[in-house]
Image: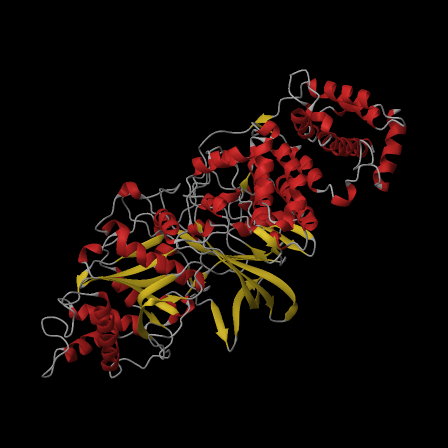
Amino acid sequence: MYSNYLTDLQMLLLLLLPTLQILPATRQLHSRSGRTLFIELPRLSVAIGSDDFTLSRLTPLLKAAVADKPDDSKIWEEVSEAVAESTPPPRPIASSLQQTPWLHNTSGFANSSEYRRDIDRVLKQELGPLYVGLRRLPEVFFGRVPGLDAASHVVFTKCTKGNDPLFCGGWAGWPKDAHQDSVLEWFSDISQKLAIFAEETLPLPTHGRRPLAQPNQPILDSTAERKLDIGFVDDPKALKDTQLHWSHILVPGELKSNPLADTKSKAWLDLGRYAREVLAAQDTRRFVLGFTLCGSFMRIWEFDRLGGIASDKFDINEDGLRFVFTVLGFLWMDREALGFDPTITTEGSRRFISITRNGQAERLVIDKRMKRAPCIAGRATTCWSVHREDDPQTSLVVKDSWQYTERDEEGELLETATERGVVNVARYYHHETVHVRGEVDDVLSSIRGNINIQEASNYRADQLIQPGSSSAVDVPQKGRSSLAAGKKRSSSQPEAPLPPSKRSRSASPTMASGPALPNRVHRRVVVQDLGTPIYQAKSPSVLLSVLSDCIEGHKSLRQQAGLLHRDISVNNLMIRGEKGFLIDLDLAVTEQREEASGAHGKTGTRAFMAIGALLGEQHSFMHDLESFFWVLFWICIHHTGPEESRVVPRFEKWNYVDTEELAGMKLGIVSDEDVFAKTTTESFTNYFKALIPWVGRLRRVVFPSGGRWKKEVSGLYASMQEVLLQRGDRTKDKGILPVIYGEPAWEEKLRRLKVKVGF
């Protein structure tokens, strides 16, 4: 009973102080420190919510405020006295840089036009070193086409025969100046001739496919306009003027007339830009094969969730057999060899994902794609809404992502959170490590076939981002979450091989000597709660309520499961009906863990990162709470309604500038009351202008005195929620306590409190 009394008292004070702060008098009256009460009150509000604050200190203030005949001068006197008293020192926010580093990634853009100049700068960072000169690459990827080697010899021999051979010291019709338009026409023509020759040797393909050159025709589905020189497409009837989507492109190609353009800043990056579009448009694509042709020099490329690798270059006019082998390989590869996920199957117009849950097989029918992260290297999260084949009425969400092997499994963290009764967080249903042909689906082994990166002609050991273990697939025991302890296999794979995190060192694709290579493994998580992003809330007032729900979920995740989320963004805050909840524990860690995860890079949406996180501070729950503020700020600027958004040039640059510059830009907005008011007035959409007072109050709580909190204060949760839940219909001036009076439940609490404490 006493604890309930203290909780009620705490809530009354948290209602009272923000109400006092918005009154004009707070800007005129000063505390003993010389600062205005307007500046001091947010500090006091946060302190009240902390566990170690003595509520009895504010009894005189509360007595004065709820007196039958309140005296304003007495109330302000007690306010000044309350803010003057020192509060117990909260824990400092850790400033150590020994945590997971942050890497820029093209999937982290929010409300961006994705102009090429901006994309290229970030894509270079995302791809990192592009390793070339790997002689085994053609063998690994084209070796998956049965009979290709023998057929290539037969076809090439045919090309050298006859009175007018296609190949004689070079390819017939090859443009001597290697001009792009001429090469494009030649390439399409020679590819079709080679295909006709091969039909006599190789089994007829079950798919239709052809090369197509459309260098001046924009491909549909890009955020910004993108054109593709040449590629192999899945429509055998496609012509030069056929309007194509990126979903039709199977193998992208990049042509340059100058052989010296075979560099990262030119042909390689151009092809990478196309590979990003292909991966974004095709939601079951695990990797993309492509090629560059600079003059007559060709390379074969492969792009996956670790970046890009390429073969050695060869002159197609000197090594005609290898050119035949390459073209026929692209034409005859099946979908799995091209990089499509064989664990997602199609029957008629329906697609299925099969899982084994609690020892029972289940087929999940895909209803629609919800999200596909537009990137090459990274987690590359894809989400689908699905239902069980035997239960069409119950919706689930399947999430696929590519995780560094050093990270705790999100499925295990979600399972623990659900078991411990965490509220307002997506509920666990199932998780597994994806297997292809009975083997764990990872990049180094399953996709790249254990190609030795150290054999690349441009390999440098100091370019590698080192993992935290001596094996690319071993998970370091130090720093691992205790939540996952004792779990041996995914629940769906009781007889499957151990996932990479549990394999022995002998199973590692890492070379015996030299530094360990980074690796990513394909994880699949299924949750029970289907929602929509928070910015689709049906009204501004619902948005505030939903944001408060998500803050409650974050607090519950910490208190009930000991987990810190670390990736608060518009896409990770969801709404179902009018209830908000959190998703995505990819970057979550146990809060008390002393070490970083050992993983190589923390990606996220820069627009929502806290200022301290941008500056390199070790992540704290205070940073996550600040991120909630930036989510609300961003939505109010960029969304003109539940279904419409816009690009704002002033804020679009937040996606691209370096982290320290972005920290300065954010601090410049919130540090001054007048600057912030001007920014919100000029930048908020008409739909959200009514929220300017709420966002302003939230700023004062999150950034007291226009600065950042240098201490961890758990009371910030309650203070932020209180601001968000001050609804518009409850702010009519009813005296000094407009929020409390007029609420029957709180009036009854006031009456009981007066009796208990003798007011």
Left or right of 625? Residue 758 is: right
Residue 676 picture quarter: top right
Picture quarter with the C terminus: top right
Q: Residue furthest toward the top?
A: 32
Residue 263 x/y as whole percent: 24, 52
In the displayed structure, 564 sits above or below 497; it is above
Look at the image and name its color scheme: secondary structure
Picture quarter with the N terminus: top right
Who's the residue at 52% across and 76% down the image? Answer: 349
Residue 454 x/y as whole percent: 25, 49
Residue 448 picture quarter: bottom left
Left or right of 286? Residue 66 is: right
Residue 593 x/y as whole percent: 52, 36
Who's the residue at 29% across and 60% down the image? Answer: 301
Who's the residue at 48% across and 38% down the image? Answer: 479
The one of 102 and 352 positioned closer to us in this rendering: 102
Who's the residue at 69% across and 47% down the image? Answer: 545
Left or right of 757? Residue 361 is: left
In the displayed structure, 65 sits above or below 204; it is above
The one of 61 and 185 positioned closer to us in this rendering: 185
| Residue 411 in view in this figure | yes
Residue 450 x/y as whole percent: 31, 56
Q: How many marks?
A: 0
| Residue 450 in view in this figure | no
